[in-house]
Image: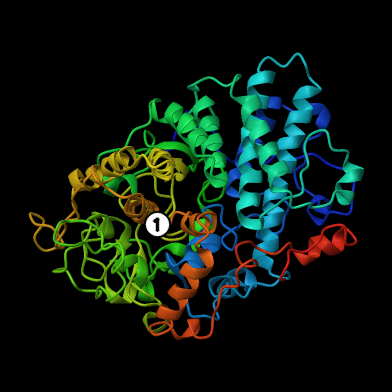
Amino acid sequence: MKIYNKIAAIVMVVFTMTSCAEDYLEVSPENVISEDNLDLEQLVVSAYSTLDYRYNTGEFRDNWPFDHAPTNWCFSDIRSGDAYKGGGGVGDNPGGGMHALEIHQVFPSSDNVYNLWRALYFSVFRVNSAIRAINDNPDFENAALRIAELKVLRAHFYFEAMKNFGSFVYIDENTPVDEVASIENSFDADYLWGKIEGDLNAAIPVLPETQPELGRINKLVAYAYLAKAKLFQGEWQDVITNADKVIAGPYRLVDDLEKLYSTPGYGNPENVFAIQYSIDDGSEFGNLDFGSLLNSPDSPSDDPNHPYLNGDDFDKPSQNIVNAFKVDANGLPLLDTYNNSDLEPRDTATPVDPRLDHSIGRPGITWKKWEPMPMQDNWNRDIATYGYYVRKKNQIDPYSDLRASGGFPWAKGALDWPIIKISDVMLWKAEAAIELNDTETGMTIINQIRNRAKNAPRVYDFNNPSVDAANYSIELYPTIGITQNYARKALRMERRLELHNEGHHFYDLVRWGEAANWINNYMLTESGKRSYYSGASFTAGRDEYLPIPQIEIDATGGVYKQRAGY
């Protein structure tokens, strides 16, 4: 079955281009369409298709991005305490350096880092190529609209570069190819944010508030990115101004968290912008979330009673994030003490936020609506190294008719990946209000998020579906008489509870200025449970960002300069 009215990210149209010193521009594309015969609409769709970091170069790394996924699970989740790397032990390393990412011992030679850089510039190249082609065809009916969409896409990719590398080499449609290798990476944050915001501000007057095809960028998507850019720069009033425009739009918190994380299409009203996936679209497996291919639970001996069969069990929720779901007698998070003791894997008596069992698999707890069995211990590949918890969030309903297969590619199907959700935008506004000392507004918004979780259907007991699977408790914060410090702690905890393992927490820690202290404390505490953290450390001023890939520095003859500390 197809999902119609989507921008299906399957069209792989690329330009031939004069060779230059940049490695990512030297790759020879396959199935090239001549510039003289381009369908401009198809070319725009090919730029959208790069959101999932898959390209038709013929290289394995460019079609299977599970070591540099656009979901950022390997660059945020496992670097921030939301998740352990997982898989078959510390030596099981997609891309060669994933364990190094987890313990913050990344080198400029890392293939994971290079593959991310490469993917981002492949994407920028497609966007710039499409803009140039449209500019060269002034009679194209949708020229202004499509260029506006493309500029927001470019802002997205450069935003990803900014979050991960702390800077980027700015190239647009007007950059001569023979000058690309001579452009320095200046690390001037104000200039680079200005370029991102410039694309967004240029697009906003042109874009409509709604588009006829689900997945296309609209005005509110651009406002959301502008709010996020202001968030990362701490320009709080501008965050509120732009977030309000998105919040006033058609997006809403959906009612059922289980369906939000499981059912294709159910999250559409909540997703401001998402990577669109599909099946039965003419490609070998379907246009699937191959960046998250490794993250479904294991299935010993391909047990047919298992919901997915033979998953690789990466991106495993950490004990720390599980502990964060514990609540006090009032149903509120233990903001300062949640990690003082561990919630045991089979503990269903301790009161917890109900979002825990919607998003994290625990032994003995019902797995979505799977009938043969609840989650089992042996769904974990390496309990001794990584523990008992598996990723449940954003794994497709195993009974969905929009699932690609009962076997490989396991838990993949037409379940879209949310890049920006309305819950995220709401929490941006809440954070900005709190930083402006309007704690009442901030706490009121946080309560809206919590109220959805409070009223959503609960995970039911596997043997007795009429009762809850655990002792669930969630209540609302008071909104009056709250100090700014308390409100800030509540906001930061709520972002984690609502958005954990969605690729946000590491970047939040960095922009809050908390990364070094928080991650070092996390790894020190975890070293008593996970021995591979012993001796690991986060170096302030270095590890907030990834190194510039050495292969790119070499390709430019040293024009690019490495970040300090690498």
Expressed as whole percent of the image width and height from the top left, the position of residue 525 reads 40, 79
The residue closer to the viewer here, 453 or 390, is 453
Asked whether, in this view, residue 38 is left or right of residue 334, the answer is right
**Amino acid bearing label 1:** His
Q: Evaluate whether residue 184 shows in this view.
A: yes
- The one nearer the camera, 361 or 249, is 249
Q: Position of residue 300 (x, y in %)?
A: 36, 75
Please indicate whether residue 411 sits to the left or right of residue 49 in the image.
left
Under tag 1, what secondary structure? loop
- Against 25, residue 90 (above or below) is below
Relative to 551, say whether 531 is above or below: below
Q: Position of residue 403 (x, y in %)?
A: 40, 49
Q: Which residue is mark 1?
A: 500
For the N terminus, the image quarter is top left
Q: Between residues 97 and 203, which one lies in front from this camera angle?
A: 203
For label 1, the crowd category at 10 Å Cα-Cα, with few meaning under 14, some 14 to 19 and many 20 or more, is many
Q: Quadrant of residue 562?
A: bottom right
| x 42%, y 54%: residue | 405
